[in-house]
Amino acid sequence: MAVGEGPNYDGNGQITTSKLATYDQMVSFLKDQDARQPAMELEVIGQTVKGRDIHLVKYISDPAKPTILYLTQQHGNEQLTTEGALEFVKHLGTGKSGDVLDGVNILIVPMLNADGAMGDVNFPLDDYLAKGDRNMTRYNAEEVDLNRDHVDKVQPETQALHNNVMRKYRIDYMIDLHHQGTRSQRDGELVSGSILYPTTPNADPDVVEKSKQLGAVVFHNVDSTGWGHLGKYVGGSAETISRNGIAVEYGIATLLFEMRGMSDHYLDGYALGLRSNGYLIKQTVTTLTATAAAIADGSIADADTSFWDSLATQTSRPGEEAEDE
Ligand SMILES: [Zn+2]
């Protein structure tokens, strides 16, 4: 069964945050992995509004090699991307991802919006749907959307990312991982996710082409599985959004990946129950593993981007707004 099929509430399990890693659990996992993995470095790049340390996971063996950055949870209520990234970190330590680190440097910023992820915010959460020990919000503690702050960089989370990651490393590729609503479809079937490259006219055409190659690796590895079904995301050209702004400011090839369904929301139709968690975490692990491997062995340069010309833009089933990013 494709992850996109089936009803949301009863069919996909209860909407609850209780099975998701807390911020503290994530940090202790990362510290434990750092102690076990000689190739891994763990760095604090700044603090959230509420003072939580923001972490960067680094695997840099040779700065001359190509480098990819994976960013998760700019929106605190989109957590399965982080769960997948942590699983990927574990795989890098056990060798389950092969010798990929010989050919690529990997940077991971997981749970950028840790305050939103913990519901530790300066605004009311009365309308939020999820059961469990906490609610989770799109916005940071100051009710700001971090993925609209990539030009002005006012919030401490955005500043940490730009000052201590984007400006500090020579990064070639970035995937920005999100979740969207539950009711988006392509060719009549609900999608497990959707993808998009930079769409601002100010992005260098070579950067856009490299971004399309990054998307090609993701599409061909995910859509070919029994559970993956990807559409083209509907996204704007604003450079306040990382997909556009980071491509223009740093010349980095970027890809937005929107997984199906959020961990919490105040609107029906956005949040998705527990039963899809396994597929969506696997979708993230597959995405990170495949892209790192394609960069490491150079095959990304041969990725066939022609699928973009025929990939249908996702549409929304009635009664649903599909927007995220
Ligand atoms: Zn998002």
Image (tube, rainbow, N blue to C red):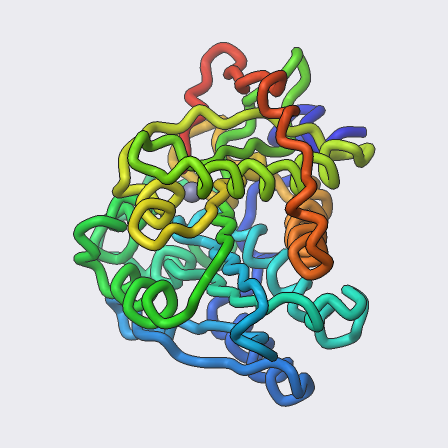
- The x, y position of residue 104, in whole percent, is 63, 66
Relative horizontal placement of residue 276, taking residue 262 as reference (left or right): right
Looking at the picture, tell me which residue is in the foreground, 211 or 262. 211
Count the numbered circles shown: 0
- The x, y position of residue 180, in whole percent, is 49, 34
- In the rendered image of this protein, does residue 221 appear above or below residue 58? above
Q: Residue at x 81, y 29 (%)?
A: 1
Q: Residue at x 62, y 65 (%)?
A: 86
- In the rendered image of this protein, does residue 274 appear above or below residue 172? above
- In the rendered image of this protein, does residue 140 appear above or below residue 129? below
Relative horizontal placement of residue 322, taking residue 250 as reference (left or right): right
- The x, y position of residue 105, in whole percent, is 58, 69
Q: Quadrant of residue 52?
A: bottom left
Q: Residue at x 28, y 59 (%)?
A: 158
- The x, y position of residue 175, in whole percent, is 51, 50
Q: Quadrant of residue 120?
A: bottom left
Does residue 33 appear anywhere in the picture?
A: yes
Does residue 11 appear anywhere in the picture?
A: no
Q: Quadrant of ligand 1?
A: top left
Q: Residue at x 59, y 43 (%)?
A: 214
- In the rendered image of this protein, does residue 190 appear above or below residue 103? above
The C terminus - image quarter: top left
Looking at the picture, tell me which residue is in the foreground, 263 or 100. 100
Looking at the picture, tell me which residue is in the foreground, 285 or 300. 300
Looking at the picture, tell me which residue is in the foreground, 303 or 126. 303
Relative horizontal placement of residue 35, taking residue 56 as reference (left or right): right
